[in-house]
């Protein structure tokens, strides 16, 4: 039942954003609110559980990519840059980041901390690639700033809606540009 509640909550987030009510959720599940509260003491706990599950999912995907000996450094970098949550389905509400910041600041801080840790893991991979000469030397401080700024802007509601893109579309495009650059492929 707990997983059913989580999945239904993600559907509500996609439809109403984080402003969905527990009544909305109970109606979607065709259960009483009491049944939901048997598994989650509050809506904040439910939102928190979703975010923890999503961050764990992303970490597992990234770890699998890093441990895949069949991938080159460039392929690992491209794959990591495209990682999006899959474990609990896709959260497609573009306003989620803004809504979390406004209505659930503690949970928003979890996402911010996770993103910072994720960037550190990514930069560690880059440094490893530079040290092993799999990648050319670059200024990692500049790369860190490019990625941090780009992710903030790519996930903005305005950019995604005006560009008619999904988050995975934006991540794929960013990955292509960062890994393959602007120059045409050599023949």
Image: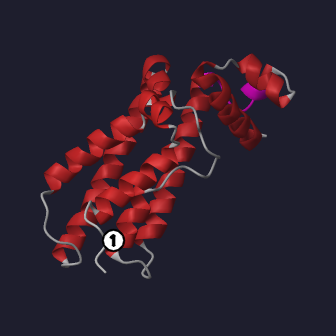
Q: Residue at x 37, y 52 (%)?
A: 174
Pinpoint residue 62: horizontal percent, then vertical percent: 44, 61
> Neighbour class for label 1 at 10 Å: few (<14), some, many (≥20)?
some
**Is residue 34 visible to the viewer in this orientation of the structure?**
no
- Provide residue 77's location: percent of width, then percent of height: 35, 65
Judging depth in this view, the residue of 119 and 152 nearest the camera is 152
Q: Is residue 101 above or below residue 127?
A: above
Q: Position of residue 115 (x, y in %)?
A: 37, 44
Is residue 38 highlighted in magenta?
Answer: yes
Q: Which residue is mark 1?
A: 74
The answer to if 46 sits in the magenta stretch is no
Colouring scheme applied when the structure was drawn: secondary structure
**SS state under label 1:** helix
Give the residue drawn at x 57%, y 45%. 53
Range shown magenta: 35-43
- Asked if residue 83 lies left or right of residue 53, the reply is left
């Amino acid at each position: 039942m707990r997983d059913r509640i989580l999945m239904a909550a993600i559907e509500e987030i996609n439809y109403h954003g984080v402003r969905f009510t527990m009544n909305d959720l109970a109606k979607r599940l065709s259960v009483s609110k009491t049944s939901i509260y048997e598994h989650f003491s509050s809506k904040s706990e439910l939102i928190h559980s979703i975010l923890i599950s999503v961050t764990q999912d992303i970490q597992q995907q990234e770890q699998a990519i890093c441990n895949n000996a069949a991938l080159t450094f460039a392929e690992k970098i491209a794959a990591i840059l495209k990682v999006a949550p899959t474990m609990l389905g896709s959260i497609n509400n573009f306003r989620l980041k803004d809504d979390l910041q406004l209505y659930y600041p503690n949970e928003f801080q979890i996402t911010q901390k996770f993103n910072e840790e994720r960037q550190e893991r990514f930069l560690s991979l880059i440094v490893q690639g530079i040290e092993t000469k799999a990648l050319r030397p670059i200024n990692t401080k500049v790369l860190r700033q490019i990625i941090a700024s780009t992710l903030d802007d790519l996930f903005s509601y305005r950019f995604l809606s005006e560009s008619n893109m999904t988050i995975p579309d934006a991540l794929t495009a960013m990955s292509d540009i960062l890994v393959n650059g602007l120059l045409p492929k050599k023949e």
